[in-house]
Amino acid sequence: MLFNSIQFAIFLPIVFLLYWFVFDRFISKSKWQLRLQNAFIVVASYVFYGWWDWRFLLLIAFTSLCSWGSGLLIGKAENKKKAKIWMWLNIVLNLGILALFKYYDFFVSEFAELFYISTDGLLLKVILPVGISFYTFQALSYSIDVCRGKIEPTRDIVAFFAFISFFPQLVAGPIERATNLLPQFLKKRKFDYDTAVDGSWQILWGLFKKIVVADNCAVYVDRVFSTYTEQSGSTLLLGIVLFAFQLYCDFSGYSEIAIGTAKLFGIRLMRNFNNPYFATSFADYWKRNHISLTTWFMDYVYYPMVGSSDKLVYWNFCMIVTFLLSGMWHGAGWTFLLWGLYQGVFIVISMNISKSRRRFEKKHKLKGNRLYEVLSMVVTFFIVTIGLILFRAESIAQAWEYACGMLQFGTLRASYRFFTLPEMRLTNLFVVMMLVVEWLQRDKQHGFEGIDKLCFLRNKYLRPIIYALLLVLILIYGGKHASFIYFQF
Amino acid sequence: MKRFLGAFAIGCIALFVFCGLVEYYQSQVDNNYSYKYWYMENRRHEVVTLLLGDSYIENAINPGLMGKGTFNLARSSRWIYYDDKLLEKYIADMPNLKQVILGMGYKPPFFKSYHFPQSDSKEHENNEHEKYMYEKYMHIRYDDNSNHWLGLYRGYIDPGTLIGNNLLCDSLGYERVDGQSVNWLLEHNVDSNVFRQKYAKEQVEEYTGYLKDMARLCHLHKVRFIVITPPCHDSYIVNVRQEGLDILHGIIENVRSEYPVEYIDYLQDEEYRADSIYRNCSHLNSIGADIFALRVKKDLGL
C-alpha cells in the first residue's frame, strides 16, 4: 500500500480511530489494553504490508520470531560467549535470507558470466520483498543491542512484532533502534493534540516533497537519462541535478510521512534527514542524509571493525569498507558498489582534511562567513550529485558514458530551452519552493513545523480548511510517478 | 482528541467542497475532449470522413483540406480501445459517413504506456490522465474499476487542464502545432527493440482485437475502413526494424483475412524527408499536416 494512494487515505483514518477509540478508550481499564493495542498495530501493519503481497507476511513474521527468540536466548545465556553465538546465529540467519532474495541471482549471474556457465535452472528469479532491507536491519539491531547490554530482551512478543512491523516505517524506514522504538510499545501511549497536529503537517510536507517535487522531477530525469547519448553536456548536468532533488525528495518525503503518521499514534520515530543539501562538507552530508542507515552502519559495522585500533590508515580502510557495504545494501549491482566506494573515498578525504580545513578557516576568519558557507554547500552538493550518476545509471558503462557526456559542454542553448520549457518552469518553481522552506526551517524538524502558529493559521477553523486546500493543490500539481524509489531496496 | 477530530471533520468537509469546486470548474472548462464530444453528439450527421487515432493523426492531418464533412476525432496519446468505443458509439447514427481513417503508428501496437515507454507495465496505469479525461468528457470508461476521481486523487491530472483555455483544436478537431520542439530529433523517438518489450506480444493481440472490431463495425455499416501509418523523420526510421514492420503489416493482414481494410504505409515515403515539416521525429507540424492531408485525399480519391 503506497502512502500516496486512495487505499492508504481510507486505511489511515480507520486504523487511527480504532487505535484510539476502541483499543485505548473502550478497553482502557483492561490489563490487556496495551497488549491488545499492540496486537492491533501488528494486524494493521500486516494488512498494510500484505496489500502488496500477502505471501511475504510469513517472511516478516519469521524474521520477527527469530529475532525475538534470539533476544531471549541471549538474555538467558550463561556467559558472553554463548550470548554472542546466539547473536551471530540470528545475524547469519537474517542476513542469509536477505542475501538469498537480494543478492543470490546477481552473484550467480556474474559468476556464471565470468566462467561462461549457463544460468539455466540456477537462478531463483524471486521478487524482492518490499522493505526487506529495512526490517531485517531493524531486527538485527535488536539482537546486537541485547548482546551489548543496551536493552533488556523483551518477553512481550506482541510488542516486539509491533516494533518490527510498525507500518509507517516498515517498508522504507527510518530504520529504528530497539532502544528508541521498542520501549514505546511497552508503555501506554497518550494522545497528544499538539503532536498529532504536528504529525499531520509533517505528512502534508512529505506529500509535497514526494508527489509535487520528486514526481515532477522524475519526468525530466527519465527523459534525459533515456536519451543521454544525444543530449548536450549541460543538459546532462541538469538531469543529474534534478535527479539529486528527485531522490532526496522521494526518500525524505516518505520519511516525513512515516514520522508524521507515527506521531498520530503517539509514537516518535527518529529523524532520517536533516537538510543534507545544506551540508558544508562530505562528512557533514552523511551526518544529515539517511541518518538511520548511516548510524546503523557506523554503530554495527564501522566501530566494531575499528575496535581499539589507533591507526589512521586502518580507520580509513574501515570507513571505505563500511560505505562499500552501504552501497551494496542499496542494491545488487556493480553501480551501487561503486557508488558506495565513491562515498567511502570522499568521506575519508573529508575526514582527513578536516583539521587542515579548520586551520584554514581560522586563519582566514571564514567561520560564520555566509559566502564561504554557501560555497561549501555548493561544492559538497556537486560532489554528491556527481556520485549519483552511479546511483541512477543502469550499468557502469552507462554511468561512464553519462559522465563523459557531461564534459562535452555542447550548446547551452539546448539546455536553456529544455530547462525553460513551460512544464519545466513549474518543476523548477517547486524545487525552489522546497529549498526555500527547508532553508527557513533548517532549525526545525520538518518544513511545516510550527506552521500552525503562523498568523491566520492560528484560527482553529481556518487551519483545517487551509490544510485541505493545500492537500488538493498537492494532488493537482503532483507528478505522474506513483512508487517510491527506496521501495526497490 | 475531540479538538483533533473536530479539526479533521472540518478538513474533510473542506476537502469535499474543494473537490466539488474542482469538479464543477473542470466541467465548465473546454478542452479537446469536450469539444470533440460535443461535435459528435451534435454534428455527427454532417461527417463524411472520420479521422481516428492518436497524435499522429490529430496533429498530422488538416481535415480542412480533405473535403467537406471531414472531422478529426483523433486525440493525442489515445489507446485504440477508445477509437473502437467511439466508433461503436456513433457509427450507427452517422448516415453520411463514407470512410473512417485510422492512424496506426509504428509504436502504439506494442505497448500502452505512452509516458514511460521503458515501463514494464502491461496495464494502462500510466495513462490515468487519459482515463480521467475520457470518462469525464467523453463518457467512456476504460474498465469497470476506473473512476475519474482516481485521476485527481493520484495526481495524474495535468494542472494545465484546470487553468485557462485548453481547447487547442480548431472547429474540425485539428490541433495545429507549428515549428519544431526542443530536442526535436529525440522527442518521441522509438526504441529500436520496441517490439521486444516485455508485454509486446500481448499488446499486439489486444491491439489486433480492437482493430478487427473497428473493421467489423465499418463493414457492417458499409463504410470504408482505411488504416494509414503516418510518415516519420529519418532519425526515427533509422530505429525501425524490419521485424517490427513485419509485425505491423502482419496485424493488417490478420484483420484483412476477415474484413475489408485498406492500408497505406507512409512511414518511409520519400515525399516526407524534409526536416522542416516535422514537429519532432515522429510528428508532422502544421506544414507537414497540410501536405499530408492533401496527399491522403488524393490517394484515397476523396
Image (cartoon, coloured by chain):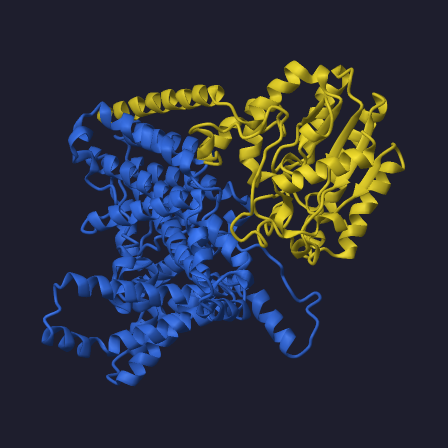
B200 and A181: which is toward the camera: B200
Q: Residue A356 placed where, x, y %?
A: 18, 79
Image quadrant assignment for residue A297: bottom left
Apparent colour of chain B: yellow
Q: Position of residue A73 (x, y in %)?
A: 37, 62
Q: Quadrant of the N terminus of chain B?
A: top left
Image position of A396 with respect to B182: above or below: below
* Above or below for B9 versus A244: above
Say which residue appears at 38% left-offset and 46% top-offset. Answer: A213
Residue A66 is at least partly visible in this image: no
Q: Is residue A425 left or right of residue A184?
A: right
Q: Is B67 situated left or right of A371 in this image?
A: right
Horizontal side, residue A450 vs residue A409: left or right: left
Instruction: Please give the count of numbered marks on the rendered protein.
Output: 0
How far from the left and from the top, in percent, is residue B249? Answer: 82, 46
Using the image as rendered, state which of residue A179 and residue B3 is in the foreground: B3
Q: Which chain is blue?
A: A
Q: Is residue A53 left or right of residue B238?
A: left
Q: Quadrant of the C terminus of chain B?
A: top right
